[in-house]
Each structure stands twice: as structure tokens, then as C-alpha cells.
Image (cartoon, rainbow, N blue to C red):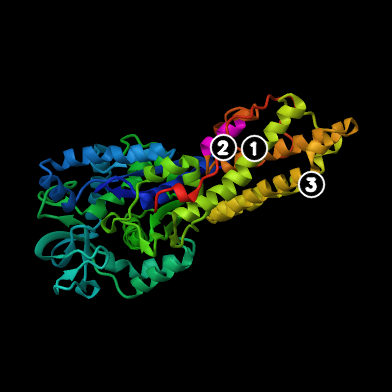
Amino acid sequence: MSKGTFSVTTPIYYINAAPHLGTAYTTVAADTICRYQRMNGYDVAFVTGTDEHGQKIAETAEKNGMTPQQWCDSLAPAFKEAWELLDINYTDFVRTTEERQTRTVQDFWCGLYDAGWLYKGAYEGWYCVHEETYYAESDLEKNDEGEFVCPDCKRPVRRAAGEENWFFKLSEFQDRLLAFYEEHPDFIRPASRKNEIVSFVKGGLQDLSISRSSFDWGIPLPFDEGHVCYVWADALLAYFTGMGYDQIERGDEFERRWPIQYHFVGKDITRFHCVIWPAMLMAAGMPVAHTVFGHGFLLTKGEKMSKSKGNGLMPADLVKVFGVDAYRYYFMSDVQFGHDGSISMERMVQVYNADLANTWGNLVSRVTNMTTKYFEGAVPAASAGAESNPLREIADALYAEYDACMAEVDFTGAAAAVQKLAGRVNLYVEESAPWALAKDPEKADELAAVIYNCLEAIRIIALYMAPFMPNTSADVFGRLGLGDIAEVTDIEAATAWGQLPAGNPIEIGDPLFPRLDVDNLPEL
């Protein structure tokens, strides 16, 4: 029986270039929590996609001698290829140029138009084409030439003088939003993001332009010919589309899913998700998502990773060095989700060698080797006293600790909890000295108990490692003669001690994580 629905989204990524490490970081995090909650008995939906409208897309396409749709079609595959490379198991990928997204957007904004939440006016102010964002002059900075520049990307902004737009009455939601934040303390996480948003809203909200009339690359607004939907007023609604809102015969799918559990976003777009988006939902009379989690930036040498700074590595660059599972494990275990995290090649190698090569990989290798040597490659039958051992004590408490970490989106804590068991098994091997027990025929039962306990702990570790490293865990399950780990839907029951069948064939296989030498790796 399913525990219910569990639904997560990443941002609908702007399709200006192929995904970089920062984009992948958000997506791997969403995939990790979704993989766990599937194993934990939930009916999971995981939505990602690409944001393909806006002035920047139209101008870039023209510079490249292509139509906007051709330009988008040429870039969209890079996202799906990157997520395939990283074993991202999403349930829906929404492109905002799809017909179903048009249905969602037009239905939603027509509803707000009919309800009186929109009015036509002229926008006077500053606009950054690169960020697709309007700014008040007080928000802008100046470059060395004295030009106003975007506070985010530092590019010159354009003066939008008198362009006719449709506006959403965002200013009327200031008090409702502040009350909502107070009543739902977990809506904005971590707490540092919440403080920023509350301060911003208390400073006063301006009505929001939701259309553009100076270009036509966007979803047309049916109630006013010549106006297309502003990019954010389009992209946010892709979350609805991915949950089934656009379906002509919707049934109860959307109603089952909404409100969702998490929007995972970078901290630079929390305002859109924590101010504009909930106000839109309130105006439509719809519930707001449970939590927007605004994680921090990945930093190299103290700077945010970005293509414009020349430090925006692609995921494939690191996968070539570490492999997919080690890549996923590093970013989830060593970078605290919610905070900025400094990354380096030296640190990645350190984590790889310590956690994966020396602890997890070495454990699997040495225990399967001893099983082959002492028990002809089959799981030994454990004696009656085998259930009482220090490994079981840790394993029995692991679900509660791991599940609590996942509930707090603390991937680092969850990984550390599993490594605690793995480290204890390695110590148990040293303490028990199976190689010495094997020399004494009278110690045969004790030897069988030690090997069984180690193999059983490895089985349990593989289950808890699966959300982080799905391929490795599937490999370990195969080496233990077990079935498809992806079919596990009750991880608490599956990790109860003593379920590894005696007699199962054991395979040694290649080392899971061969040690790496930092001196022979490229610089990050």
C-alpha cells in the first residue's frame, strides 16, 4: 500500500546553454530524495524541464540564423542527455513550447483575468534581457562606464519606456503572504532564505508585468491579441503541467498531486518562487506548495560557478574522472544542501578515496573475497547467536536516523549515517579476524556468523546507498545474489536484520571504486 503522494520539482531551466554543475546539483538532489521516497513507499512525481520563451531566446536565435523554435529544439536534447548521464529518474520533462503548456498557461491567466486580478498599463523602468527580469533603479548597479547594470549578471540593462503590458495585482498580496509565511514556517527553507523573503515583502510589493507586447516569442494571451506571456508567468506554470493540470480529462491526478511537497531551486530565484508564485496561486484560489527549498551556490576558489566566468564545468567533465555514482555521492554528501559549498578536485578525490574506495568499496571487496575463500562463494548459514552483534545494533537504528535526515533534506547527514555502519563493519572485520578463525576448525560456526553478519550489513548499506548511488547498489545486490533493488518499496521492512538467504551465490567482481591519485587529475 502506498503511503501517499510525494512530488518534487526542479526549476524549469532556462535553455540558454547546456546544463552545468550548478544545474545538475539541483537535479541530482531532487532525484536523490525522489529515489528514497519511492523506496519508502510513496507514489512519487518528479518534474523538471526547460524554459524556452522570452526576448533573450528570440534575439539569440536570430543571431544564429534560426527561428526561436529551431534554437530551442537544438538545445533541449542537451538537458535530457545530461539527466540520462546522471541517472536522473524524472517522471515528466516539460518544455514550455509544448502545446500542453500553452493550454495550462492560457487557462490559468484567463481565469485570473476573469476574476479581476489583471489590468492593462504601461511599464516604465529597467529590464535585463539576460535575466528576463525587471528592476527598480534603486536595485541597479553602475559599471566603469557609468551604465546601469543588472545586479545579478552585471550586464547593461535596457530602458523599457511605455511598453504596454498586462499587470498582475501583486501588491494586494503583501499582508496575505506575510501571514502565510507566519502560519507555514516550513514554506521557505532554509531559515536564512525565509528571513530574506520576509524582509523583501515587508519592504512593499509592486504590481507585476505578466505580458510583453514588443516581441512575439511567447504564449499568446487569449484575451488581448498582440500580448505574449512574460517568461516567469509562463515557466512557473510548468509545475502545473508536469502534475497533469493541462489534461483535458484531468480526473483526480492533479488534485491528488497538488499541493506538492518540494520546489528545489537555487537561492537566486527564491523571490520568484516564494513571492510571485504563491501570490498567483492565492489569486487562483489554489493551495500553495508545502516547501520551497532554496539551496546555495557551488563555489570554486570563492566564486560562484557560471559559464560567463569561465568556471562552469559540465557534469560530463567530472563523470569521466569519477564515474556517475561517485559524482552523485560527492555533491550530496559533502556539500550541505541549503548552504554555499566550496568544491575542488582535491576535496572530491579525498571524499572518493575515503568514503568510497577505502570504506565502502574495500568492504565489499574484502568480504566477498573471504566468502569465496572460506565458504565456496555462498552465503553461510548463520548460527543462532549471530543475530546478537554490534552491526545489528547500528542497522536497527539506521532507518529512523536516515529517514529523519531525508525529511529535513539533510543529504549530508543521511550519507554520514550510512557511512557510520560501513565503518563499523570494517572495524568488526578487524576485531573478528576471520582469517584467524578460519585456521581453527572449532571456530567454524563463529566464522560463519562473522561472514554472515558482514554480508547482511553490506546488503543493508546497499539499500541506503541506493538513492545516492543507484548503479553501485544494484551491482552490490547482484553480487549478493539478490533481485532488483529498484523494486524495493518499503525500505524500513527491507532493511530489517537477517533477510539475506543462506546459500545465495556471492560474486567478487571488479573493485567498485579504484583509488584515485589527485596528482594525475585535471584542475577544477
Q: Residue at x 27, y 42 (%)?
A: 101
Q: Quadrant of residue 248?
A: top left
- Between discs 3 and 1, the one toward the N terminus: 1
The residue carrying pointer 2 sits among few (fewer than 14), some (14 to 19) or many (20 or more) residues within 10 Å by Cα, namely some
At which x and y percent is residue 197?
38, 68
At which x and y percent is residue 327?
47, 45
Query: What stretch of residues is rendered in magenta?
Result: 470-477
The residue carrying pointer 3 sits among few (fewer than 14), some (14 to 19) or many (20 or more) residues within 10 Å by Cα, namely few
- Between discs 2 and 1, the one toward the N terminus: 1
Residue carrying label 3: 431
Instruction: Spot the residue most to the front.
Output: 519
Dot 1 falls on a residue whose secondary structure is helix
Please count the marks in the image. Answer: 3
Dot 3 falls on a residue whose secondary structure is helix
- Type of residue at label 3? Glu
Q: Residue at x 40, y 49 (%)?
A: 522
Magenta-drawn stretch, dominant element (helix, strand or loop): helix
Q: Residue at x 34, y 63 (%)?
A: 271
Q: Is residue 100 left or right of residue 86?
A: left
C-alpha span from label 3 to label 1 = 17 Å
Residue carrying label 1: 364
At which x and y percent is residue 516?
51, 45
Comparing 515 with 46, the one in front is 515
Residue carrying label 2: 512
Comparing 146 with 161, the one in front is 146
C-alpha span from label 2 to label 3 = 24 Å
Q: Is residue 130 left or right of residue 506?
A: left
Q: Are marks 2 and 1 in contact (CB under 8 Å)?
A: yes
Dot 2 falls on a residue whose secondary structure is loop
Quadrant housing the N terminus:
top right
- Type of residue at label 2? Leu
